[in-house]
Image (cartoon, rainbow, N blue to C red):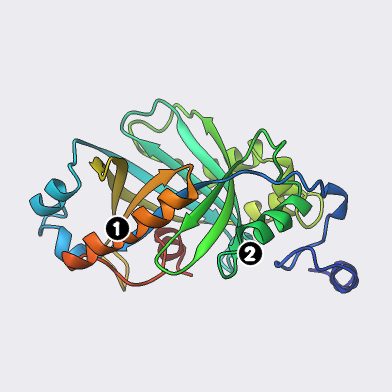
Amino acid sequence: MNKFLKSFSVMALSISTITSTFCFPVTTYASDNLATPNYEVKLMMDTSKILGSNGNLSSDAKTTFDISSSEHMKVQYLDTGALDLNNQGWIVRIRKFDSDDNTGITYKKRYSISNGDVTSALKTADNDGFDANENNYSAQVDWGYGTQTLSFSDNKIFSLDNYTGINLPNKKDSINEAIDNLPGKLNKYLYNGWAENELNNSILYGPYSGTRYIGTWNGLKVELEVYNINNDNYNYIAEISFKTDDYKEASSERQNLINTLSINNWLIKSDESKTGIMLGE
């Protein structure tokens, strides 16, 4: 950041406490018309306990979660080497499944939730323009083992003839598509053109190959995703999740899922996320 922008940012932060991230406050957005998020519980699983030597899901895990179908996918992320987008709470993800004709690209803004105070995080997001009137972004509380994060996701699609099946575009084509589909809130987040500049200087994190298993547990649809990471610390990672619109259900079933995973010795008691692992946070 140049000296002018740095000075302006410090001055703005000194007169405003509306945001918990280092960015220019946008007080003109505030509406007090807070978004209504759904909830997604996400827990990491010990792949040494649920996968066979070939990387396939064990029969015990399939039975426990009543796995009825699966599909292959690939995922990759765009960010600078210093993770400048991620450091401002933004994620740019590109993904494709077996069943997809087009490639999906997701732009996600994340806000930390302290001590379960979702309302405070929603107010911070409201000041950034993410409110109940937002039509492009869907609000969600991601609830892990010990932390919660509020996220707003804008999902778009594109198609490139050069990439068949679940193959994802190379860095150049990924950057071009990410910029072509760039949402205004992201590109103007710090200053006009900020995100485009960061994307132009981005590298690819991935692609990572994975399988999504679909099942049913306690009357809820569950998704168990397994990825081949093959880096210095991991060969595979796995995450199980379910969604609900109801906070009480999310809370009670999250504890039940923790209990189920713990009894089977499958739970990783960590808030490390699959996205964080793939980005090398």
> Is residue 58 shown left or right of residue 134?
left
Residue 189, above or below 2: above
Picture coordinates of residue 266, whole percent (x, y): 21, 65
> Is residue 44 shown left or right of residue 199?
left
- Mark 1 burial class by Cα count in 10 Å: few <14, some 14-19, many 20+: few
Tag 1's secondary structure?
Answer: helix
The quarter of the rendered structure image containing the N terminus is bottom right
Picture coordinates of residue 29, whole percent (x, y): 83, 48
**Circle count:** 2
Mark 1, residue position: 256
Q: Which amino acid does label 1 sit on?
A: Asn
Residue displayed at 40% across by 33% down? 163
Picture coordinates of residue 214, whole percent (x, y): 26, 40
Q: Nearer the viewer, residue 147 or 195?
A: 147
Question: If you read the primary sequence from the N terminus, does the residue marked by circle 2 or circle 1 appear first?
Answer: 2
> Is residue 239 shown left or right of residue 215?
right
Q: Nearer the viewer, residue 142 or 218?
A: 218
Residue 209, above or below 104: below
Distance Cα–Cα, label 2 vs label 1: 37 Å
Tag 2's secondary structure?
Answer: helix
Picture coordinates of residue 137, whole percent (x, y): 62, 40
Mark 2, residue position: 84
In which quarter of the view is residue 251 placed? bottom left
Residue displayed at 61% across by 43% down? 36
Give the label on residue 104, or none: none
Q: What residue type is labelled 2?
A: Asp
- Mark 2 burial class by Cα count in 10 Å: few <14, some 14-19, many 20+: some
Whether residue 27 appears in this view of the structure is: yes
Whether residue 206 appears in this view of the structure is: no
